[in-house]
Image (cartoon, rainbow, N blue to C red):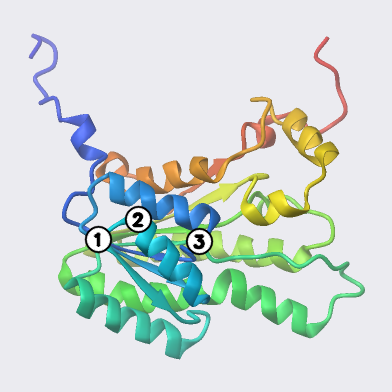
Amino acid sequence: MTTADNSPIPDYLARLRVDGRNFVVAGAGMGMGRQTAHALAQAGAAHIVCVDVDADRAAEVAAEVGPQAIAWVGDVTTREGAARLAAEAEEAMGSIDGLVDIIGMAQWQSILDMTDETFDWEIDMCLRHAYLLSQELGRRMVATGGGTMVFIASVSGFTAAPMHAAYGAAKAGLMAWVQSVAIELGGHNVRANAIAPGTILSPRMDAVFTDEQRASNAGNAPLGRMGETSDIASAALFLSSDMSRYITGRTVVVDGGVDAKFPYPVTLE
């Protein structure tokens, strides 16, 4: 202690640990979800339910993460699927202390050509599961004294991205949803936050990007590289741990500094 400040010094590294806590990772089968499951396991999570619609992916990731991982297969964009996940995860782990919801995907269509099916699919894929899981898992977190929720949004929810307006609208809705969850459940010690990735070299993106597109996206970022799925997992671990214990209702942008740039053409020389 000093003469000017007698506040205790916490164990900051311990705050980043999640020892003994039980997590659900929705969309754990690959990319950001796979990395997040590993991050939570390395930080001491007692159990991790690895959720995916593909049975092989769920099983492979659970086996890779280790004995604390549990594979779960189902579609949590439906009420039936979300309710079954919550019940079975609680039964398997005893309690649910944290959720990381990675689920989301974009279809590329112009506004004038977009179909009702595409719009509805994007709402299901990017927003509906957040609503359902917030309810089904949130009730259990409230009953057991609290927890954390982390959702993957997108920078497309802040600014318009060409050819996937429905995706951007759904992600903007997700960020608004997170704020409401944080306000309504904060009194029950439940925190809710979102992460807005920029261009991340996920397995899906890696499969379709050309070398020219990789170079262009890397050059567009002030940090000079594309984001990696582990960058998102690192943010998810931070928001799931006590290191962020006074942060709720926020969206953390992880985009290498792209959104900080002046939006009009200008050179730095």
Q: Which residue is mark 2?
A: 65
Q: Residues within 10 Å of mark 2 (few under 14, many from 20)?
A: many
Where is residue 118 shown, x and y percent of the image?
76, 78
Give the residue displayed 44% in from the left and 69% down from the top.
Answer: 58
Front residue of 100/51: it is 51
Say if residue 248 shows up in the picture.
no
Q: Give the amino acid type for the residue marked by disc 1 in the picture.
A: Gln
Of the residues tagged 3 and 2, which is closer to the observer? 2
Task: Report the disc number at residue 95.
Answer: none
Q: Real-space Cα distance between discs 3 and 2?
A: 17 Å
Q: In the rendering, which numbered label is found on residue 68?
A: 1
Mark seen at residue 102: 3
Looking at the rendered image, the quarter that the N terminus falls into is top left
Q: Is residue 237 above or below residue 263?
A: below
Relative to 267, does residue 107 appear above or below in the rendering? below
| Label 3: how many Cα within 10 Å (few below 14, some 14–19, many 20+) | many
- What x and y, as percent, mark residue 208? 77, 53
Q: Quick one: label 3 or label 2, which is nearer the N terminus?
A: 2
Q: Secondary structure at mark 1?
A: loop
Instruction: Specify the quadrant that holds the C terminus.
Output: top right
Q: CA distance from mark 1 to mark 3?
A: 20 Å
102 sits to left or right of 189: right
Q: Is 260 placed left or right of 34 in the picture?
A: right
**Among all residues in the image, which is located at the extreme bottom?**
80
Q: Nearer the viewer, mark 1 or mark 3?
A: 1
Depth check: give the residue in front, 196 or 185. Answer: 196
Closer to the camera in the image, 68 or 255:
68
Marks 2 and 1: CB-CB under 8 Å?
Answer: yes
Residue 53, x across and y down, in percent: 52, 77
- The secondary element bearing badge 3 is classed as loop
Dot 3 amino acid type: Ile
